[in-house]
Image (cartoon, rainbow, N blue to C red):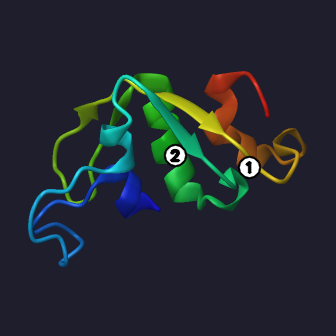
Amino acid sequence: MESEALRPRPGGLHWRASRPRRGSVELAARGTLFLDEVEDLPLALQGKLLRLLQEGEYRPVGGTRAKRADVRVVAACNEDLRAEWSRVVAFAATSAFV
């Protein structure tokens, strides 16, 4: 999911990226990014998503500089996120649970 959302760069961590490719965050610019089954996000990715929500910026996979993103995030899950604090951390900035 990380490489899809945060766009791999040539020569970066993902060797298959032979040319720059726009990730989900960049494609959703000035629009809405829908994330499904967010309860399955690894903790490391939750932190990156939290940075996107709070600061409006992200670092592309293999990139060395943060990029700004003007994107609205809508998330869905199959669990009650309020019941599990470790899962809520990445979504605290939204203040609304679906």
Q: Which residue is mark 1?
A: 86
Q: Who is closer to the viewer here, 16 or 95?
A: 16
Residue 13: percent from left, percent from top: 23, 70
Tag 1: Cα neighbours inside 10 Å, few (<14), some, or many (≥20)?
few
Q: Assign the C terminus to one quadrant of the image.
A: top right
Residue 38: percent from left, percent from top: 66, 52
Is 52 located above or below residue 15 in the figure? above
Q: Who is closer to the viewer here, 4 or 60?
A: 4
Q: Residue at x 13, y 57 (%)?
A: 20
Q: Residue at x 33, y 29 (%)?
A: 69
Residue 25: percent from left, percent from top: 37, 41
Is 98 located above or below residue 6 in the figure? above
Lateral position of residue 28 relative to residue 18, left or right = right
Residue 81: percent from left, percent from top: 82, 44
- Please tell me whether mark 2 sits on a helix, a strand or a loop: helix
List the single residue furthest toward the bottom. Answer: 15
Q: Which residue is mark 2?
A: 47
Tag 2: Cα neighbours inside 10 Å, few (<14), some, or many (≥20)?
some
Question: On residue 67, which mark appears?
Answer: none
Q: Amino acid at mark 1?
A: Ser
Lateral position of residue 77 relative to residue 26, left or right = right
Q: Amino acid at mark 2?
A: Gly
The CA distance from mark 1 to mark 2 is: 11 Å
Q: Earlier in the sequence, mark 1 or mark 2?
A: 2
